[in-house]
Amino acid sequence: MKKNASLLSAIMITVCAACNQGNNNPPPPGDTVGTPASKVVELPEPDTMQSHKNFSNVIGWPDGKTPVAPDGFTVTKFAGDLRNPRNIYIAPNGDILVVLSQSERSAKEKIAGLISGKSKSETAGNSANTIILFRDADKDGVPEVRETFLGGLAQPFGMLIIGDAFYVANTDGVMKFPYQEGQTKITGKGETIVRLPAGGYNNHWTRNLLANSDGSRIYISVGSGSNVAEHGMANEKRRANILEVHPDGTGERIYASGLRNPVGMDWAPGTQTLWTAVNERDELGDDLVPDYITSVKQGGFYGWPYAYFGQHEDPRRKGENPELVKKAIVPDVPVGAHTASLGLAFYRGTAFPAPYRDGAFVGQHGSWNRSALVGYKVLFVPFKNGVPFGEPVDFLTGFVADKEKSQVYGRPVGVTVTPEGALLVADDAGGTVWLVKAK
């Protein structure tokens, strides 16, 4: 508890430290990278011979147990008995939409009894590849309405509403459906407006969606089909990119490239700068390569597969594309190697204490390619005036049950801020959506 109590003060301290440094820009590529507080961190040498596999064993949440937030916050179960809840989207009228995604891993493995033939979630009417609608009209954290919003999908993740259209990103394409505000179920016929590459070894199947401020453009995140293009770049067409399209699916272009698995996307408050959370490559040792969150420059190249964290050349792709390596952009904020940082949401509310405002929450799904578990938490990165302004700190922890036995209660993914200023966290393996409020 003392550690949790110190988190808020830690944020304040690192904000002040960053203020004294007066420089939040990343250094030129080299042997070191800069953290948001200008602290220099050395990257270890890559080691392709020291790759560990340590998959977590999800044991589920015991009755009455929840993740742990800092003092001054409460954590409650907003919704449970869900089949792989992975992403959350809030409609303009406040309805909360939760994607129940059937990932490749969850389709093949039994996860602590949550997925075993007909799971408890399925018997409650919540099969995977479905979107569930929750309506909490009185905002007490207990939804009065829980309905199947849309089913029959193909590994869905991203959701978006623009005007009278609802969009969902399946792993193989973006679909558009007619929508009226307040409806609890999609009844109209949908059409695929963008077909996307799917499948492949080490498939990164999630496809996220984000619109710009006037709804004239949609951004689609598409992860790579491999770890480091070991099966050739011909299998990576339109992948490891953020794509940009018109709302009707036309005018596609690559907005940014070289992003191994960009998932979470959001706009930094007070700016027109796109940010993304990127799940970086594996099998270079326990401490490489750092996952990161970064501002995304239009036309920017972020290194994958030839280089990592700027112009650090990957030994498995050495000498293949030196001119492109020279163009690789150093990401803004490293958030730990193998943490599987997937979720990203900026805090635009006022309910949380001031140090949290305009900062970024990062959902870390947790490691498998590391000797000891890392991630399995929600991280917070302070921002000021649209740029990082302090070191990342733990915000929501307690997902790891026994680190030595690699046992975890659940795995956080998507993070979303409600209009009232609370934080919703999708815990896919734990079958739960958690609600974090300030006291």
Image (cartoon, rainbow, N blue to C red):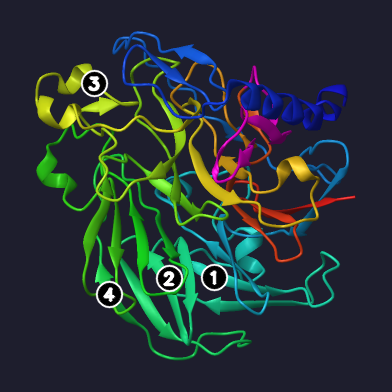
Tag 2: amino acid = Val
Say which label, 2 or 4, has the lower sequence index.
2
Image coordinates of residue 392 in percent, x first then y, are 62, 30
Say which label, 3 or 1, has the lower sequence index.
1
Asked whether disc 1 touches disc 2, contact meaning CB atoms under 8 Å apart, the reply is yes
Asked whether disc 4 touches disc 3, contact meaning CB atoms under 8 Å apart, the reply is no
Number of residues whose C-alpha sits closer than 10 Å to that of mark 3, classed few (under 14), some (14–19) or many (20 or more): many
Report the mark closest to the observer, 2 or 4: 4
Circle count: 4
Number of residues whose C-alpha sits closer than 10 Å to that of mark 1, classed few (under 14), some (14–19) or many (20 or more): many
> What's the mark number on residue 249?
4
Residue 197, visible in the rendered structure: no
| Magenta-drawn stretch contains 118 | no
Q: Report the Cα–Cα distance between label 3 and label 1.
A: 39 Å
> What's the mark number on residue 168?
2
Image check: 154 left or right of 93?
left
| Residue in front for this viewpoint, 65 or 221 | 221
User: Dot 3: what SS?
Assistant: loop
Q: Report the Cα–Cα distance between label 1 and label 2.
A: 9 Å
Image coordinates of residue 346 in percent, x first then y, are 60, 51
Tag 1: amino acid = Ile
> What's the mark number on residue 131?
1
Say which label, 4 or 1, has the lower sequence index.
1
Number of residues whose C-alpha sits closer than 10 Å to that of mark 2, classed few (under 14), some (14–19) or many (20 or more): many
Q: Report the Cα–Cα distance between label 2 and label 4.
A: 12 Å
Image coordinates of residue 363 in percent, x first then y, are 58, 42
Tag 3: amino acid = Asp
